[in-house]
């Protein structure tokens, strides 16, 4: 035997053993086709077994459920509590006084139906989160949608002194409810009643529950009237147990007058046959709101998969878990889609697949009170997010019908289009920057993260109602859970795309175009304003030219918006207000002070400094 024979035999055997291993395919990425419609239905039912009012005893069941799903998926699970100011409504009442009559109590309950036992019990009170407390009694005034223009018109006709002690009757729509109540307070009203008009989401739209998806006459739209985001007592820092807290009377954005949401049926009684025209009514109202102001604990729940090669680049997917009742559509749908996506990703991880970037699945608490859970977490981890976060994908009311819609910041247009194409979905013709009203806001405005909202949408009339249960989804909106399935498949495709380190999140060119478009609408009715516009346009164009001509790699391109974040505070480039949003918020605020050119100069200079820092990095 040759001296080389043993070596050759060992080498040959090693090669023979290694060959099958070398030919094996790498572990498969998460498979969208493994999303289960049946499992989605089971998840929605499990989440909606009990109401999920933030901080309530009943909401703990959903916290445990999300924790269980993430644990079974093999993720690292983190439960993060925050101690927040969310006053619980202890009692409420509403009475009306018709001409020549006596005071009559109005029934504020929503009337359920036997076809859906969940609508018959466990209702949250008819309440506005973070409204004022106390009593108000006075003449009713019909104030339309409660816009600034409508209140100004009322003042022009009647004089502001006429509103003293009055109660504003306001129709939902056109404006975030918190701004409606704030407007009523600013014009001297002692209280406010907000109602859902049947023309908007009730019988005028079609059959009402239980025979159709629209709001019955007793249906009520609850909701927050806080005109800010996050825990009110810890503005700018996380609401941890031993955090410093300001007093409620120091909080900006809280309304001080009591308000209640009421049904269209009760609104008709209060109108007493009058047409919906701005002005005083024949009736008076007496309302009271009593609250428990003690702090309550909320919990965000996270499932985390560390990235294999780029663990310090984070892709975050989130959906709020809390609701104003059983919350099947808002936001049982988004939470269900998120948890199903986690299951599919978990199966791939168990089979050996690893994302290149770290994946964080988040279920937020307290969103309905003013994006509280997400805002507290962003404030808690702002420095890390500014350094590491690549993208945030938000799922809020994710599956209620066949119509796909999405909105995103410029850096996520390519990823959204790629995921749509993979799933055979027509890419929306416009993917504009999302406005306010959901958990993407703190990521964009406090940490400068590129954000995306998407969902499959349809019509119904149960928004923030006790009627928002799985019955509605199973009977009318998505009986086969096919829209839930499509949403989860889309989410899995986004995971596959964004978790790959080579997937660029680069919206710099589109940001430039958006900014130039906003500047075209910039007022120029004074020399100071013309100079400010010219400075902002020149800085934007210079930066845009640098992007086009620079050979520098775009490794930090997803951090574009972070150049416009002050050390403490919100974006100088883009900011939401209620459901809407506006460009250059500090500049816009300075423009309202026509006699203060120095404030305008300082606001413009802060934006210019952001462009300067971006240009220096190229």
Image: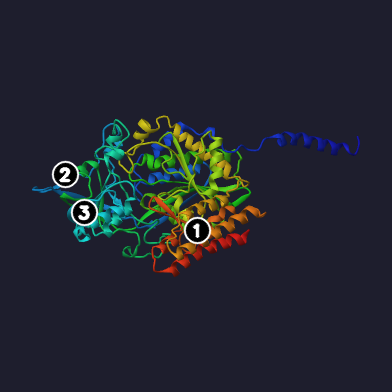
Mark nearer the N terminus (2 vs 3): 3
Residue named by callout 2: 272
Name the spot of residue 257 as percent of width and height, x first. Answer: 26, 58
| Secondary structure category for the residue under label 1 | helix
Tell me which residue sits at (63%, 49%) in the image: 309
Mark nearer the N terminus (1 vs 2): 2
Tell me the quarter of the image containing the N terminus. top right
Residue named by callout 3: 167
| Secondary structure category for the residue under label 2 | loop
> Are the residues at dot 1 and dot 2 in contact (C-beta closer than 8 Å)?
no
Q: Distance of mark 2 from mark 3, alpha carbons? A: 15 Å
Tell me the quarter of the image containing the C terminus. bottom right
Name the spot of residue 71 as percent of width and height, x first. Answer: 50, 44
* Mark 3 crowdedness (10 Å alpha carbons): few <14, some 14-19, many ≥20: many
Q: Residue furthest left?
A: 100
Q: Distance of mark 1 from mark 3, alpha carbons? A: 42 Å
Name the spot of residue 416 as percent of width and height, x first. Answer: 53, 42
Question: Where 345 falls versus 279 (above or below)?
Answer: above
Total marks placed: 3
> Are the residues at dot 1 and dot 3 in contact (C-beta closer than 8 Å)?
no
Question: Where 476 falls versus 182 (above or below)?
Answer: above
Left or right of 551 on screen, residue 388? left
Residue 418 appears anywhere in the view: yes
Residue named by callout 1: 382
Tell me which residue sits at (57%, 63%) in the image: 612
């Amino acid at each position: 035997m040759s001296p080389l024979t043993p070596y050759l035999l060992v080498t040959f055997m090693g090669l023979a053993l290694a060959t099958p291993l070398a030919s094996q395919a790498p572990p498969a990425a998460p498979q969208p086709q493994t999303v289960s419609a049946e499992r989605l239905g089971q998840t929605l039912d499990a989440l909606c077994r009990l109401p999920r009012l933030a901080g309530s005893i009943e909401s703990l069941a959903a916290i445990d459920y999300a924790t269980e799903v993430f644990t079974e998926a093999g993720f690292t699970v983190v439960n993060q509590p925050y101690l927040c100011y969310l006053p619980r409504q202890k009692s409420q009442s509403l009475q009306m006084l018709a001409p020549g009559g006596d005071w009559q109590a109005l029934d504020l309950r929503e009337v359920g139906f036997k076809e859906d036992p969940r609508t018959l019990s466990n209702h949250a009170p008819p309440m506005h989160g973070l409204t004022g407390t106390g009593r108000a009694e006075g003449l009713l005034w019909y104030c339309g949608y409660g816009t600034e223009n409508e209140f100004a018109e009322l003042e022009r006709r009647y004089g502001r002194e006429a509103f003293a002690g009055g109660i504003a009757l306001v129709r939902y729509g056109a404006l975030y409810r918190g701004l409606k109540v704030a407007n009523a307070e600013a014009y001297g009203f002692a209280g406010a009643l907000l109602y859902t008009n049947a023309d908007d989401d009730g019988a005028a739209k079609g059959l009402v529950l239980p025979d159709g998806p629209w709001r019955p006459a007793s249906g009520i739209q609850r909701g927050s009237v806080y005109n800010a985001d996050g825990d009110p007592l810890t503005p700018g820092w996380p609401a941890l147990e031993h955090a410093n807290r300001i007093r409620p009377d120091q909080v900006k954005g809280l309304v001080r007058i009591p308000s209640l949401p009421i049904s269209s049926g009760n609104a008709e009684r209060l109108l007493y046959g009058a047409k919906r025209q701005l002005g005083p009514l024949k009736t008076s109202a007496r309302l009271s709101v009593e609250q428990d102001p003690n702090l309550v604990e909320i919990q965000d729940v996270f499932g985390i998969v560390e990235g294999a090669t780029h663990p310090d680049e984070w892709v975050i997917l989130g959906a709020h878990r809390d609701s104003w009742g059983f919350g099947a559509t808002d936001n049982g749908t988004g939470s269900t889609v998120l948890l199903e996506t986690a299951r599919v990703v978990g199966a791939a991880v168990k089979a050996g697949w690893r994302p290149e970037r770290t994946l964080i699945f988040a279920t937020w608490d307290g969103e309905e009170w003013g994006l509280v859970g997400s805002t507290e977490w962003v404030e808690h981890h702002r420095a890390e997010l500014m350094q590491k976060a690549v993208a945030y994908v938000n799922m809020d009311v994710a599956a209620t019908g066949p119509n796909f819609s999405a909105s995103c910041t410029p850096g996520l247009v390519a990823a959204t289009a790629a995921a749509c194409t993979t799933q055979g979905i027509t890419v929306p013709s416009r993917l504009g920057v999302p406005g306010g009203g959901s958990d993407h806001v703190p990521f964009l405005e406090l940490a400068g993260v590129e954000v995306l909202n998407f969902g499959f949408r349809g019509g119904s009339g149960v928004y923030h109602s006790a009627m928002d249960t799985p019955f509605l989804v199973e009977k009318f909106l998505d009986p086969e859970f096919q829209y839930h399935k499509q949403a989860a498949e889309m989410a899995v495709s986004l995971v596959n795309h964004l978790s790959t380190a080579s997937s660029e999140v680069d919206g710099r060119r589109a940001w430039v175009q958006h900014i130039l478009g906003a500047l075209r609408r910039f007022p120029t009715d004074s020399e100071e304003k013309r100079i400010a516009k010219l400075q902002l346009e020149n800085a934007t164009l210079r930066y845009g030219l640098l992007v086009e001509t620079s050979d520098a790699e775009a490794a930090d391109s997803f951090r574009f918006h972070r150049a416009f974040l002050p050390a403490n505070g919100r974006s100088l480039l883009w900011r939401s207000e209620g459901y809407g949003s506006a460009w250059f918020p500090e500049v816009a605020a300075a423009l309202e002070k026509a006699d203060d050119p120095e404030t305008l100069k300082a606001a413009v200079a802060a934006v210019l400094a952001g462009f300067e820092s971006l240009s220096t990095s190229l």
